[in-house]
Image: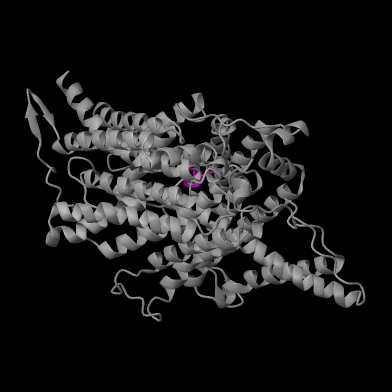
Amino acid sequence: MSTFVQLLVNGLGKGAVYALLALGFVVIYKATEVINFAHGSLALIGGYLIAVTVDTLGFPLAAALGILGAGLAALLIERLLLSRSRFATPDSLALLTIGIDVVVVEDIFRRLGTTVPYLGAPWDARPIQLGGITLFSTQLVALVVGLVLITAFFLAFRFTNWGIAMRAQAENREAAALMGIRSSRVTATAWLVAGALAGVAVMFIVTQDFSGTGLSRTTHAIAFAAFPAAIIGGLDSTAGAVVGGVIVGLTQALTEVYVSIPFAKVAVFLVMLIVLVGWPAGLFGTRELSRV
Amino acid sequence: MSDVATAVRATAAPAPRSRRGSVLRVIAWAALLLVLLALPLYVGPGLLSAGQYVMVGAVGAIGLTLVIGQAGQLSLAHAFFLLVGGTSYAVLAGETEQAGSEYIVGLGLPPLVALVGAVAISALAGLAFAPVAGRLKGIYLGVASLALVFLGFYLGQALPMLTGGAASGRNPEPFSLFGFSFSNEGYLAVLGVPFRQSERLWYLFLAFTVIAFVLARGAVRSRVGRAWRGVRDNEAAAAVMGVDVLRAKAGAFAVSAAYAGLAGVMVTLWLGLLKPDESEFGTFGLNTSIAFLAMAIIGGLGSIPGAVVGALIVYGTPQVLTLFADELGLGDTLAGLSPTVISLYVYGIAVILVVLFEPGGLAAIGRRITGFATRRLQLDATAATPPRPAPPGEDRS
């Protein structure tokens, strides 16, 4: 029983990290209908910036730099590449982000060479004993940070001008533009926010508690699990992203212990397949209707 | 409607050409084939091996361009079907052996039977995915197919009985046909050039590629291809026209998987080793799926010659750069600028450029050039009549 509680808490912590990634994913999708295959590389950019500056700046400043850098990288991708190709369909832009991902990932690992740096996060590798169960502080901090950021996001999404503009644009792009909403600004901020969220997530992924390895291809593969998270929840549902993230985190944590670690990597995707067969647009996504 | 298919503007069967044009085309193809046939007489094993790798890519990319470009079903599962094909061949053709504590299964069938069996098993694996493919569209389907790559990653490690395990893998039986082995076995010389494994495999792979190419063209130009394009452009309309949509989708997936399976057999023969990946980044990993996707996109989704040229760029660059690494000063010192890294830059950037500037890929560029040339020809022939403006939607998709 105590193992189960332990897994539950750790799974929720992982889930919060996946939720942050998936949320960024969904925000981009809602604003532009583009699936961002380069989301993992945004996380890597954040992680790389932290890794190279943490020794000189100290963790808090480096972390701020990483988050900002990931956000700006996303903004640059949107401004320099995606916004330039207005006539390309969202799906072909998704293919474009695959190209970006290939280049960015390769460049970062070329720079890192053979080193696999940790980010020096203060919460890493400090297990907490609590009445017979061991909790990883990374997962606990992730849970708290995730809850705070997700709440803040939903409040902003609900009440601020930006949130209203976002939702209006997702509802009907043309009508929103006619109401005076600057489409390009909404899109740009969506990418900025998504990139920053990925920058936050990477600080928890690249720890001994979470991935057990420094900044490497494994980080990228883990960030990939944000895909199933977003898909399970439904690509155009922000609440779905959070639910999907939690499902992915729990699935991983439980299967890692009760089945095997290699299986945990597939289990997430199998859960996604099962969900997709039952709900082709995810749990909370809007079903597309085709007009004949 | 705007599925991934139409995303990057996909191409259909080429428009009927003038007689003079088609004669020229036949001559060009024949000349190309002749050059490829004569190559082993002049070129060393290094370049031949690079060429074989390109042909692996070409066969796989043709399969992928069919399912994405013609049938409009985004698939990121190609690497999984490669693994299925390679493993099936190794199991069907290999012998049962005891390697250390591991017990490895092999049926010891003749290699040709094993090859056909491997392709058939891959096709069945593609067909098994049809219930999922039938329910999903566009990006959802792409991400769902991603699940197969991770499944393959797990199964490759979990079934050492079949795959030999991720640590050591297993050696596939060299291909042989009627007693002639495509390996270093026996001595054979043609025109004074000794034909060893690399020369023999070159011809074998060339035959595979030509068969794959011709069959794909046949499919695209026939009823099957029309059904695929119908489904791609508008499922409802295709259904009204009498196309069985689910069947067309399932068929496209099966065909594409069969191609990938053949590519999988080819890559295991090329490496002389079947080894499942130890990390998510490997021979049968997501990166391979993405490399094939890049070939199809660069070549122009749906275009079969485009897929071959895409393979030349994506798989040819690293091989050729490796061969000439010393001449180009590409030591391992240059800040990790290895041939692999350079080629990844090249095709990553190529994908970006294609999406931004030429959604039809190299095929569209090629069509524009040949279109220009044939217009000139027609102009010469009928000097007075002005050229007709190109009809809208020149690719007839």
Compared across the picture, whether B5 is left or right of A106 comes to right
The quadrant the N terminus of chain B occupies is top right
Residue B151 percent across, percent down from the top left: 41, 37
The answer to which of B238 and A242 lies nearer the viewer is A242
Compared across the picture, whether B165 is left or right of A214 comes to right
Residue B340 percent across, percent down from the top left: 40, 65
Rendered view: A11 above or below A93: above
What residue appears at the point 14 percent right and 43 percent down from the top-left corner?
A124
Residue A215 percent across, percent down from the top left: 25, 53
Rendered view: B139 above or below A104: above
Rendered view: A253 above or below A214: above
The answer to which of A4 and A70 lies nearer the viewer is A70
What residue appears at the point 60 percent right and 60 percent down from the top-left corner?
B299
Rendered view: B305 above or below A251: below
Compared across the picture, whether A99 is left or right of A132 comes to right
What residue appears at the point 46 percent right and 35 percent down from the top-left corner?
A236
Q: Give the range drawn in magenta.
A: B75-80
